[in-house]
Image (spheres, helix red, strand yellow):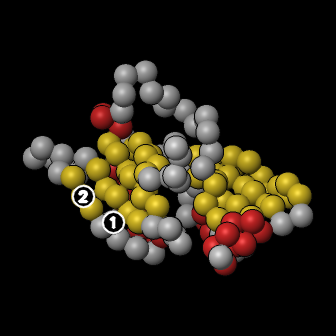
Amino acid sequence: MLRGPATISFWADDVEAAKDWYVEVLGAEPYFERPGGGEPAAYYEFRIGDRQTELGLIDRRYAPAGAATAPGGAVLYWHVDDVEAALDRLLSLGAAPHTPLTERGPGFVTASVVDPFGNVLGVMYNRHYLEVQGR
């Protein structure tokens, strides 16, 4: 049935600024771009992490009718080796606090921010993630 995340989509009013911000955060350029019909790109896609999960940045004008414009809903947590360092870096790059650094139990630490474009970005240290990756 569900085999793993394929793409997470983040909306942005200024997709070019979002691309530039995520290039800085990720240290990588997008591998795919969809033109915007004579305008700047409408979509950028990055491959991230151990499983090369896709992060898509989409011009908000293509959002479905009724799509939320405020941060909220589900949070996708990206595994990081040091949540505190990742959180500090994201905040220093202009993200806003969403949920503070929180120890959820032995080997589980989370935090989340709102990127400058209104999307919630979660970071987590998860010992089980590392165990699965080690297999």
Residue 24: image x %, image y %? 45, 70
Quadrant housing residue 67: top left
- Which residue is depicted at the point 89% across and 64% down? 106
For label 2, the crowd category at 10 Å Cα-Cα, with few meaning under 14, some 14 to 19 and many 20 or more, is: some
Residue extending farthest to the front is 1
Q: Is residue 95 left or right of residue 68?
A: right
Q: CA distance from mark 1 to mark 2?
A: 7 Å
Q: Is residue 118 above or below residue 95?
A: above
| Residue 126, quarter of picture | bottom right
Badge 1 is on which residue? Answer: 30
Q: Which residue was labeled with disc 2?
A: 33
> x%, y% of residue 135?
65, 76
**Residue depicted at 81% across the width and 61% down the height:** 108
- For residue 119, side relative to residue 60 (left or right): right
Image location of residue 57, percent across then percent down: 38, 51
Which amino acid type is shown beneath numbered disc 1?
Pro
